[in-house]
Amino acid sequence: MKIYVYYEDKNKKTYLDVPEDECSIMIQTDYEKRLHESEDGEEVLPRSVQEILDEEINKPTFNSNQTETRRHCSLDAMQEAGMDLSNEDDIELPDEKYAELCAAIAQLKPEQQDLLRKVFYEEIKQVDIAKSEGVKKASIESRLNTIYKKIRKHIAE
């Protein structure tokens, strides 16, 4: 039996040949699980292996990849729009702006400074910071937004 799964690339299906007898076990297990979870009187029919994979693996993988990639901008598109990305790691600020930024960061709480250090100097991903602190990624994003607001407010004064 030929089935497909999405792996890494959401636009490219990976086809697999799976023996029929292994598929029958999967179909039966899925059917029993759905039958147990169904409400009284609700009709439950066995699904094909492809339907099971689509629901359990392909759809979540596709959605996860879609969510991840829609947040990113294409560097090529940015260059076509006239942005100079040739030296993106070296950001030079005039001395007075640099001093303002340093002063603004110095006004932050130690834990806020530590978060900035992790994100910008150690280049630790927000999701990894969240895991290490036992919080959701949204919490880290919220903390960073608060930090950015404080820095902007301090610089604007």
Image (tube, rainbow, N blue to C red):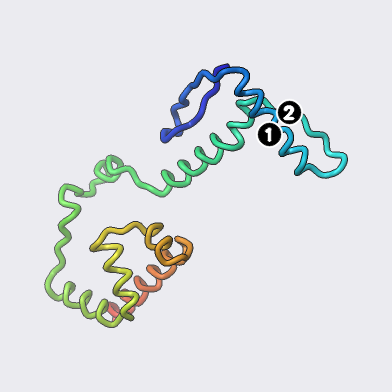
Whether residues under marks 2 and 1 lie with C-beta atoms below 8 angstroms apart, the answer is yes
Categorize mark 2 by other alpha carbons within 10 Å: few (<14), some (14-19), many (20+).
some
Question: Where does label 2 land, which residue?
Answer: 46
> In the drawing, does residue 18 fall left or right of residue 142?
right
Q: Position of residue 20 (x, y in %)?
A: 61, 17
Q: Which amino acid, by three-letter code, is at mark 2?
A: Pro
Q: Which secondary structure lies at badge 2?
A: loop
Q: Is residue 3 above or below residue 118?
A: above
Separation of marks 2 and 1 at Cα, in angstroms: 8 Å
> In the drawing, does residue 145 fall left or right of residue 85?
right
Q: Residue at x 42, y 33 (%)?
A: 9
Question: Where does label 1 land, which residue?
Answer: 30
Q: Earlier in the sequence, mark 2 or mark 1?
A: 1
Categorize mark 1 by other alpha carbons within 10 Å: few (<14), some (14-19), many (20+).
some
Q: Position of residue 95 (x, y in %)?
A: 12, 73
Q: Residue at x 61, y 36 (%)?
A: 55
Q: Which amino acid, by three-letter code, is at mark 1?
A: Asp
Image quadrant containing the C terminus: bottom left
Q: Which secondary structure lies at badge 1?
A: helix
> In the drawing, does residue 19 fall left or right of residue 102?
right
Q: Is residue 54 above or below residue 113?
A: above
Which dot marks residue 54?
none
